[in-house]
Amino acid sequence: MEKLNKKLTILVSTCDSYKDLWEPFYQCLTKYVLLNCDVVFVSESLKFNKFKTITPGFLPWGERNLIALESIETDYILWLLEDYFYIEPLRQIDVLKYLKFIIENDIDRLQISPDWHNEDIYSFINKKNQLPLFKYSKVESSIPYSVSLQPSIWKKRIYFANFKKRLLSLGFRS
């Protein structure tokens, strides 16, 4: 099987004040996110001993994430926040298919979340064999809120550019 750890890093953005969520997040992540790749936590000053933690200090949220991105060596990241609790498996074989789709179609970001119009929360996955259906919609960058903080696989360089241009210009703070 192809190695995911050479292609993707899970980046978990958090802050010290949410430390009470870290252990339950870890329990869900290790149970349901079945990926062989590095997990990097980004917080202000507190370390989480179960994952590599980058703690650049009490800087604005966006700046902390930019610093963390500089230390990530993979070309792609799976963006998560510490309060995203997976309750269904996200398997490596599926993520590899997502990455193949992203690469072949030159996609900057693939959001891995339910279609909010669909009652089936895993509308992007075929329940029978867990194969991605890739039922997706292209969101134009001119649409308000076209970039969200929902779980997504990003090209790291695009994520970095978006953070610099959008979040920091808005003064986004923790």
Image: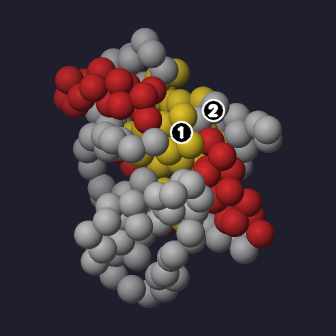
Asked whether 7 or 60 is in front, the reply is 7
Residue wearing tag 2: 37
Q: Is residue 27 visible?
A: yes
Residue extending farthest to the front is 128
Quadrant of image for the N terminus = top right
In the rendered view, tell whether residue 157 sits above or below residue 41: below
In the rendered view, tell whether residue 42 sits above or below residue 128: above
How dense is the environment of label 1, judged by Cα within 10 Å: few (below 14), some, or many (20 and up)? many
Mark 2 → mark 1, Cα distance in angstroms? 7 Å
Q: Amino acid at mark 2?
A: Cys
In the rendered image, which quarter is residue 24 located in?
top left
In the rendered image, which quarter is residue 61 located in?
top left
In the rendered view, tell whether residue 48 sits above or below residue 125: above
Residue 10: image tag: 1
- The residue sitting at 35% across, 71% down in the picture is 115
Q: How is the image coloured?
A: secondary structure
- The residue sitting at 33% across, 18% down in the picture is 46
- The residue sitting at 39% across, 17% down in the picture is 48
Asked whether 140 or 87 is in front, the reply is 87
